[in-house]
Image (cartoon, rainbow, N blue to C red):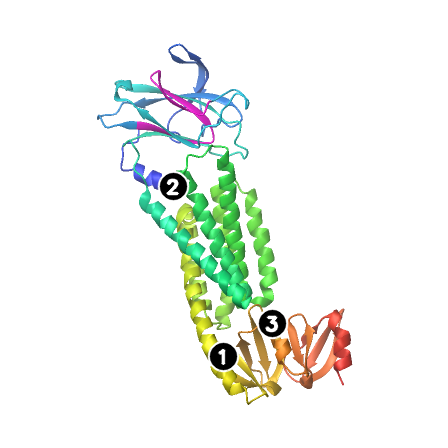
Amino acid sequence: MWRILILTLLLTSFTTLARAQDTSWQACRGALGPGGPVLSDCHPVEGFVDPQGRELWVRSTIPAPTDTRPRALYVAGVASSEAWLNGQRLGVNGRPGATARAEVAGRYQATFPIREAVWRPGGNTLVLHLSSFHGGVRFDAPMSAMVVLPYPYPQRTALLAVTFVAAGALLAAAFGFGVIHAMRRTGSSLLLAGMAGVAALQAVVESLRPLFAYPYPLHAWRMSAIWLLAAAFAVLLAAYVAARFLPKARGLIVGLALGGVGATVLLPGFDLKTVWALILGVALAALPAIAGVRAKRPGARLTLAYLALFLALALAMPEWLADFSYFLLAAALVLPLLMIEVVRLSRDDQGREAALTRAASRPDRLTVASARGVELVPIADILAVVGADDYVELRLAGGRSLLHAARLDGLATQLPSSFLRVHRSVIANLDHVQRLERDGDRWRLHLNEGAPLPVSRSRQPALREALP
């Protein structure tokens, strides 16, 4: 898709003689005679030339060039094609036919060089014979044709190089986060690995068109893959931001993302589907980022700024975002996070070694790795431990809370017997329990201070038995 945009920009500097979108085309009854196409009963074509599900003959009159520079006819779309200029056959792409059995599928894009001797002074008659019986998905604008100079068409190696660099960086980030997940089993690293992986795959899929002359039936699969990968990135982005800054609403955010992003499949046109899938995912991710800014969570401001930039580009330049800038923005998000994560893990390891040495003689203290460093927290001051993805929230006496870079399962084995798991995401200190109270069909555990804790039904019997 970004190649279409770049192609349009480059063509503005050249003499464009014919284009499917703004050239007056006529649809005709046609047959191939000894001297070329024989057309009759011609009538104007309204909108785009559409050969999908039928055989189609179209013609247009284009002016002769004013210089001797070489020209070529570029035909792109989901159809087999055959072209003539002034009765002279320019070439064939596949074999157009009246039925699917008769048609031989051509390439998605074809180039037919035009010899200088073919041109006539004044108007020149361009005829296309088209058919499309193997496209699968139906496209709103399936064809484009243009006569441009120069020939051969210049390669867009610089843009492809940027795309490949972005794809390589994203694949490296996916591998790095995968290694971190294998080491630490953190959900956030797994989400980031998925985000980097799907963005890299989309960059590869986007690059297939200029690199390979693939048959036109594969175009529907390619466009479907582009939308699907963009939708997956959007959902993973919303899940990651929610897990980091608003873990209590993670399920709601992910559910909204799945529903909203999935609904974009109903929109017309694959470009529109892809752009709105990204916009909805980023907009939903901005909600927990805003909550993180209000709660003064580390990294929330930068994340929100990144999402705001993403949305601004999406609304201002939707095609440029979906087809090219998207890869750069994805890389700009995950690569810094990978570097930050590697540095954080290194510092955590060094801090833990020092803290463990100090804590060896203090069994009444818990070594806590937080954003402010490593500190020793008296276990008696811990009211409850609440899980939040790859870290936990320690609720302490006096209303203080502390984020600890550890998982709930690991802490459950380190804490003394006075701590009991009362919910899949909550460990309570029974020394601070006031009462167990029923709230409708649920149970709540009230402590000496702070909000009551949820109690799951499966853990209620063990809690009753442990309470004095």
* Residue in the image at 50% along x and 83% along y: 355
| Disc 2/disc 3 C-alpha distance (Å) | 46 Å
Examine the rendering and report whether any part of residue 141 can be seen: yes
Residue picked out by circle 3: 387
Q: Which quarter of the figure is the C terminus placed in? A: bottom right
Q: Is residue 73 above or below residue 420?
A: above
Q: Which residue is mark 1?
A: 352
Question: How many numbered marks have been drawn onto this rendered protein structure?
Answer: 3
Foreground tag (2 vs 1): 1
**SS under mark 1:** helix
Q: Amino acid at mark 2?
A: Arg
Magenta stretch, overall SS = strand
Kindly indicate the quadrant of the structure image that contains residue 309. Answer: bottom left
- From mark 1 to mark 3, how far is it between C-alphas? 20 Å
Name the residue tied to disc 2.
3
Residue 83 part of the magenta-drawn span: yes
Counting residues from the N terminus, which is met first, the one under dot 2 or under dot 3? 2
What is the secondary structure assignment of the residue under circle 2?
helix
Query: Label 3 is placed on what type of residue?
Result: Gly
Horizontal relation, residue 166 to residue 102: left or right:
left
Between the C-alphas of marks 2 and 1, the distance is 51 Å
Question: Residue visible at 40% across and 59% down?
Answer: 332
Look at discs 1 and 3 and give the one toward the viewer: 1
Element on which disc 3 rests = strand
Which mark is first along the chain, 3 or 1?
Answer: 1
Spot occupied by residue 87 in the image (x, y as percentages of width and height): 35, 15
Where residue 21 appears, as percent x and y from the top left, is: 40, 31
Which mark is drawn over residue 143?
Answer: none
* Residue extent of the magenta highlight: 72-95
Circle nearer the N terminus (2, 1): 2
On screen, residue 428 versus residue 326, left or right, reads: right
